[in-house]
Image (cartoon, rainbow, N blue to C red):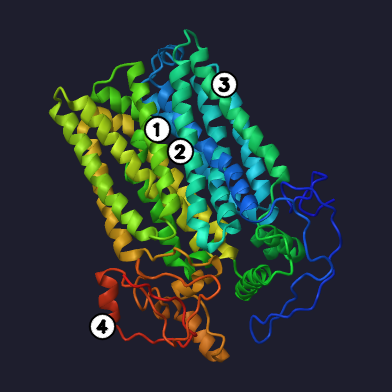
Amino acid sequence: MSPLDPFNIPIPAAHALHSMTVQAIPLTTFPMSVSSSVSFDVPGGGMSHTGSKLTGNRLLYTVTCFISIGVWLFGYDQGVMSGLITNPYFKKYFNQPTSVELGNMVAILEIGAFITSLLAAPLADAKGRRFTVRLGAIIFAVGGAVQTCTTGYRSMCTGRIISGFGVGMLSMIVPIYQSEISPASHRGQLACIEFTGNIIGYASSIWIDYFCSFLQSDLSWRIPLSIQCIGGLILAIGTLVSPESPRYLIDTDQDDEGLRVIADFHDGNMDDPVTRAEFTEIKEAILADRAVGDRSYKALFRRYRMRVFIAMSSQAFAQMNGINIVSYYAPLVFEQAGFVGRDAILMTGWNSLFYVASSIVPWYIVDTMGRRPILLAGAAGMAVALTAIGWFIKIDQSFTPMAVAIGVIIYNMLFGCSWGGIGWMLAPEIMPLPFRAKGVSLSTATNWLFNYYVGATTPLYQDLIGWRLYPMHAGFCLISFITVYFVYPETAGVPLEEMDALFGDESNDNEDDEDDDEDKDDNEDDSMYSGSGTPGSSMRSGSPSARRNNSSTPLVGDGGPVSMMKRMFANVRKKDDGGKYDQVEQ
């Protein structure tokens, strides 16, 4: 039985989507120094090829598309309710629910998601990424079944919160899993492909709501709810033959399995220098982090305060920038603009198709243009779009419905190609492996907390302040613009194991123990990030094979004006760390 597969599935868990015979792998001594006192062996020697039938990019993109079912599920769950809350049979069955009751039915899912997004971190570290995905999918399917068979308001809320438990686990673990199997050069693209799965889930739920609205019975809303169960079961079954995260395997000292999975994601050759170099880099980072020992939340906040802020703020801004006004209540927005009944759902459906199309754009630019420019452009554009939507609703002219429809579509497209995917991407890529699950759990919990706030209060705000709701969220877009400009570093192309260098957490192996202790105490002050200023969009890593330069001084990007002034006036002690990242010409 595979040590990774408690269900004793005959297909080895670490070699997903292919069949092979497992053989014992003898260790070949291949010491790699992490520090003066730590060394380890790289597995290999007995069998140079894993025997996988699916390797390299084919395996990588296959797994990426499959794991996207996880985000498809909560995209579907977010969208399905937006079409049902205007369904006459749905409203009749629940006795014409008030705006408060509608808000609770829609947003109570976020309460469940908030809880499990925090609780799932220890589970992911103890049982692995695959197990956590599987459990979340099963819980989600159970919640969907309760919603489908609901007998009233209370049972609907019960089903929604159970689904929320599953959604919270999936939304926390899927981005981690994706980041840990992705190469640095394509990590952003693969994360954005995953986010497109979320938007496809949202879009499919809207169109299913629309076509089912022609049914003259309660099936018009029960059928859309039942489809959640199918997706959850497919994902749960599929995890039985999906590969485990190689970084999780190596972190739990399953080095031979970790090397096999890394090899599968290349060309299947365990003796390939690139494969072995990647294994070595991961293992070195893990052993260096183990030297610190403490992996608690307290240690996370103490050592990586700025990373935690970036991870949590990116998710908070993604919600406060107004997306769930549209995701949850698009039909109500279109009704407010003048579309009536089924036409409001139809307009929501057309909007969702543009949303899907926009989410494809970052596939081709997020790893070349970088994260920062895309976030800045998205925030500025969304602020303009939301202000325009509010203005057109306020003036209430004959052209208002069409103007609002265009404004909503433009807003959704701007979000889809900027904050939508990148907001989920940042936390798992900037957090160090020992704290990755905890850091992402905090980030995801922040998402669901603000998600709940927006979802629960939007119907009330629409009743109380009307058109002013939209420029209010435009203000949050401007705040997010300022925060990204002055605070967020550029992470495009930086390997996960090099994030310490980017943020200035990397210790200098050439210094003596006394200097190392001093550097650890002064970590925030002496870092590239805090001392030299926020690395801006002009900072890029070199190619994976030549990430370091020979300069004795770290090169950083321009960042914002505050960062540049800090470099001009602060007395910053520079470390001789062999150089970090090359500066790209603008």
Amino acid under disc 2: Ile
User: Is there a contact, CB below 8 Å, between mark 3 and mark 4?
Assistant: no
> Is the residue 241 above or below the residue 340 in the image?
below
Residue located beneath label 3 in the image: 148
Point out the tag, 1 or 4, that comes first from the N-terminus. Answer: 1
> Is the residue 342 above or below the residue 31 in the image?
above
Q: Quadrant of residue 410?
A: top left
At label 4, counting other C-alpha atoms closer than 10 Å, the crowd grade (few under 14, some 14-19, many 20 or more) is few
Disc ID at residue 199: 2
Residue located beneath label 4 in the image: 569
At label 2, counting other C-alpha atoms closer than 10 Å, the crowd grade (few under 14, some 14-19, many 20 or more) is many
Point out the tag, 3 or 2, that comes first from the N-terminus. Answer: 3
Q: Quadrant of the C terminus?
A: bottom left
Task: Give SS at disc 4.
Answer: helix
Residue located beneath label 1 in the image: 352
Q: What residue is drawn where x is 77% and y is 49%?
A: 5
